[in-house]
Image (spheres, rainbow, N blue to C red):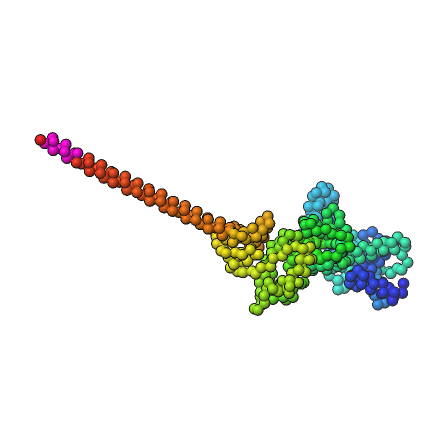
Amino acid sequence: MERQAFLSAIEQICEEKGISKEKVLETIEVAIAAAYKKDYGHKGQNIRARFDLDSGQVKIFQVRQVLDETMIKTPEEIEAEKEMAPEECEAKEVKEGELPEGERKVRFNEEKHIMIEEAVKINSEIKLNEELWQELESKTDFGRIAAQTAKQVIIQRIREAERETIYDEFKTKEGEVVSGIVQRAERGMVFVDIGKAAGVLFPEEQIQGEYYRIGQRLRVLILQVQKDARGPSIILSRASAKMISKLFELEVPEVAAGAVEIKVIAREAGSRSKIAVASVEEGVDPIGSCVGQKGTRVQAVINELGGEKIDIIEWSADPEKFIANALAPAKVLDVEINERERIARVQVPEEQLSLAIGKKGQNVRLAAKLTEWKIDVAGAKAAEKKEEEEKVTESETETKEIEKETKKEEKTEEKVVENKEEKREKKIRKSKKKK
């Protein structure tokens, strides 16, 4: 192959696979070294190749580690290892592996190792534990098996490099929303093509009741990227609360610029969500910015989520005000909070009680999740009735206390009268005795 054609092939691989030129050259060098060892090398040899892209020349080297007597296992140690049980050998290898590189003892192999005395004769500047590179005679006529070996090495290494590149690229995109096309659905899982790789939507990360068609384009959140033997494993989500936050960043410039901050989100995917927003800059309306003119901005997010209802409320550091806002669209009359038990008792107009609670308690449940307070909702009449009952109970208690006190006083008076009568009778009896 001509040099120019070879360079073009390398550049094409780099462009198609997204791999650096250095990685491709390294792969070619490993493949050449594997082919050389297959036809001309010896067992145990460490063969390395260096390929010059400018000249097209290849140099082959044998690499050996430089050792001295203290780094080599003695014949007695080797014999002792033979007599050891496999478990003991493994334990010893682990223990030796914990030592620094220069302190580990090895079994000498002339194909892999060279003594320091001989190494200095070849390279006077070589040091202990370094690698000595000795150039071998280059060959160009490789056999069919060696060529096949080189081909397999190139394919395998390029695949590994491509997987590493894809992993690195998508790892930086964790927590971002990307656009993808539905490839297939299998056992409840949906596979989505998101460019150079395919991600998976597990059932728990799908919006309940949403149907996915093959070829359908949709936005998904990259939830997590993991390394796998077959390539990067990309977990996607449409049910995550962060999905809403990222969609608002795309649709609302004030959120993307940081003028409006999304403080907290409570979501029941596919049904309803509540988001609390706050203005970072003065003069910016946080709710108006997120809703948009005639509701265009929030409607775009709702459409992307398949019609999921979204309540946008203003965040407040004051718990009473925040809880009152969180129960929107219901109007709140009064909020009483118990700091110790984190319970809020909310009073709403009687006609808005069902609105405050919501269908199957959804509104108050989301409000409690959003504010992290336990919320008890009561209508105005019910609250008044409860107050009246409490007052009646208090008055009854007071009456009982008064009755008890009165009875005590009566008993005391009776005892005093009885004592007086007894004294009087005693006096009469004494006077009679004297007579």
Q: Who's the residue at 68% across and 50% down the image? A: 208
**Closer-to-camera residue (234/261):** 261
Q: Residue 420, position in %: x, y? A: 19, 38
Outermost residue to the front: 351
In this rendering, would 109 be left or right of 328?
A: right
**Closer-to-camera residue (182/297):** 297
Quadrant of the drawing holding the C terminus? top left
Quadrant of the drawing holding the N terminus? bottom right
Q: Who's the residue at 25% across and 40% down the image? A: 413
Q: Residue 20, position in %: x, y? A: 78, 63
Q: Residue 7, position in %: x, y? A: 85, 65
Query: Magenta span: helix, strand or loop, mainly?
Result: helix
Total marks shown come to 0
> What residue span does the magenta drawing correspond to?
425-434
Q: Who's the residue at 66% across and 52% down the image? A: 270
Outermost residue to the left: 435
Indicate whether residue 310 is drawn in magenta. Answer: no
Q: Is residue 70 visible?
A: no
**Closer-to-camera residue (334/99):** 334
Q: Who's the residue at 56% across and 68% down the image? A: 282
**Closer-to-camera residue (31/160):** 160
Residue 27 falls in image quadrant: bottom right
Q: Residue 143, position in %: x, y? A: 90, 55
Q: Is residue 388 above or below residue 10?
A: above
Residue 401 falls in image quadrant: top left
Indicate whether residue 431 is drawn in magenta. Answer: yes
Q: Is residue 58 above or below residue 368?
A: below
Residue 251 falls in image quadrant: bottom right
Q: Is residue 318 visible?
A: yes
